[in-house]
Image: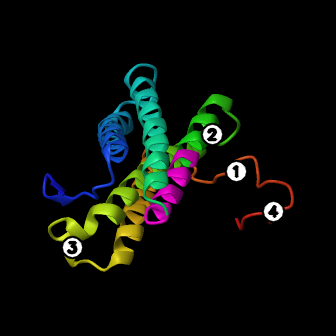
Amino acid sequence: MRILGLEVPDEGLVFLVALAVHVGAGLVCVVSGTTACLARKRAGAHPWWGRVYLCGLGVVAVSALVLAVVRWPHDNHLLAVAVVTAGLGGFGWAARRRRRPGWPVRHAVGLGGSFAGLLIGFYVDNGPQLPLWDRLPHPVYWFLPGVVAAVLIRRALRRFGVNARLWRAGPPAGWPAPPH
């Protein structure tokens, strides 16, 4: 069956309901994540939209699990993307909550990476059906959103004057020291 020009598998009512929830939550994540990213980094809009983003991300992850179970093993790679994406979101949230040295970098990398994961999941699943994207080789769906996100995260960190080392106080025990 086709919905809004995209081919959607006919896997029954559970799949369609989970897909509707998944798409809705994904749209909430795109709007709230973009708004949080563009908002001033202080009390108010940034943390509020960030919480909306994380709640939406949780719904995306749970609905991805339902979709993957219904269509196993066809969608197992998308479940892996959802797990990594949710993990990155949790990492970014935890960095902000704990406020250890260097937390802004971990916060930005975690939440920015989770946003990239949302886009990767979307393009990997839908890219072959989208105009212009359907002409790109499949690996581009996996790598382009991540590369763009990495550049934007680095640029944002520089803009806010943050030294983009993950471990400002030094690397974890047993890791080699970075070159100076």
39 or 117, nearer to the observer: 117
Q: CA distance from mark 2 to mark 4?
A: 19 Å
Q: CA distance from mark 2 to mark 1?
A: 8 Å
Specify few, some or many for label 3: CA neighbours under 10 Å numbering under 14, 14-19, or 20 or more: few
* Amino acid type, residue under disc 2 in the picture: Trp
* Residue 48 in which image quadrant: top left
Residue 3 at what x, y percent from top left? Answer: 16, 52
- Which type of secondary structure does the marked residue at label 4 adopt? loop
From the image, tell me which residue sits under label 1.
167
N-term-proximal mark, 1 vs 3: 3
- Of tags 3 and 2, the one toward the viewer is 3
Q: Which mark is residue 128?
A: none
The N terminus is located in which quarter? bottom left
Q: Mark 2 vs mark 4: which is more N-terminal?
A: 2
Q: Residue at x 13, y 52 (%)?
A: 4
Q: Residues within 10 Å of mark 1 (few under 14, many from 20)?
A: some
The circle on residue 103 is 2
Residue type pointed to by label 1: Trp
Q: Secondary structure at mark 2?
A: helix
Vertical side of 35 occupied by 108: above or below: below
Q: Is residue 148 above or below residue 97?
A: below
User: Is 84 one of the magenta-colored residues?
Assistant: yes
Circle 3: element type? helix
6 vs 179, nearest the viewer: 6
Quick one: label 4 or label 1, which is nearer the N terminus? Answer: 1
Considering the whole magenta stretch, tell me its main secondary structure.
Answer: helix
- For label 4, the residue is 175
Q: Which mark is residue 134?
A: 3
> Which residue is at 70% across, 36% downward?
100
